[in-house]
Image (cartoon, rainbow, N blue to C red):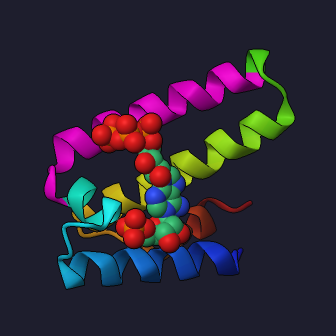
Amino acid sequence: MSCKVLEELEEVIRRRIEEGNPESYTYRLYSSGIPHIARKVGEEAVEAAVAAIAEGRERLAEEAADLLYHLLVLLNAAGLSLRDVCNVLEKRRK
Ligand SMILES: N=c1c2ncn([C@@H]3O[C@H](COP(=O)(O)OP(=O)(O)OP(=O)(O)O)[C@@H](O)[C@H]3O)c2ncn1[C@@H]1O[C@H](COP(=O)(O)O)[C@@H](O)[C@H]1O
């Protein structure tokens, strides 16, 4: 499985965190710590679920993009990468 834009986004996130620029939303989110980032991931997941039920496919795609972005920041903060997640998915593949 590969998704080039996700890999590129992961790299941008990694760079923003390394640069430590407080104007970057990514850096500010990262700096807020895992509990806060995890709460944002939960909120974005709920927003995606609501969109799926009541707001249509376009909104769902947008909310899913928000969720994936926040999940990538959470993975980075936890010392994990998209590669680690892909490894799990590959092992599960039947
Ligand atoms: N993909 C995203 C992305 N998706 C969502 N968001 C931000 O996530 C936030 C979510 O909005 P909310 O209303 O839930 O939260 P908020 O009130 O703005 O923020 P909180 O104080 O609640 O955290 C918005 O500010 C969005 O701009 C993103 N911010 C950045 N990116 C990517 O990350 C890259 C680096 O961004 P910067 O760190 O801003 O340079 C960008 O080039 C983009 O590609």
The percent coordinates of residue 21 (x first, y second) are: 21, 75
The percent coordinates of residue 94 (x first, y second) are: 74, 60
Which residue is at a point 31% across and 78% down the rendered structure image? 16
Is 51 included in the stretch rendered in magenta?
yes
Question: Does residue 5 appear to the left or right of 14 in the view shown?
Answer: right
Q: Give residue 49's quadrant in the image.
A: top right
Residue lying at the far top in this picture: please name it. Answer: 54
Q: In this view, does 33 lie above or below 21?
A: above
Magenta-highlighted residues: 31-52
Which residue is at a point 85% across and 35% down the rendered structure image? 57
The percent coordinates of residue 50 (x first, y second) are: 65, 19
Which residue is at a point 28% across and 45% down the rendered structure image? 37
Q: Give residue 4's quadrant in the image.
A: bottom right
Question: Does residue 86 appear to the left or right of 14 in the view shown?
Answer: right
Q: In this view, does 14 lie above or below 62?
A: below
* Image label count: 0
Residue lying at the far right in this picture: please name it. Answer: 57
Judge by depth and name the residue closer to the eye, 25 or 77: 25
Asked whether residue 1 is in view, the answer is: yes
Q: In this view, does 45 lie above or below 54?
A: below
Question: Does residue 82 appear to the left or right of 6 in the view shown?
Answer: left
Which residue is at a point 70% across and 77% down the rendered structure image? 2
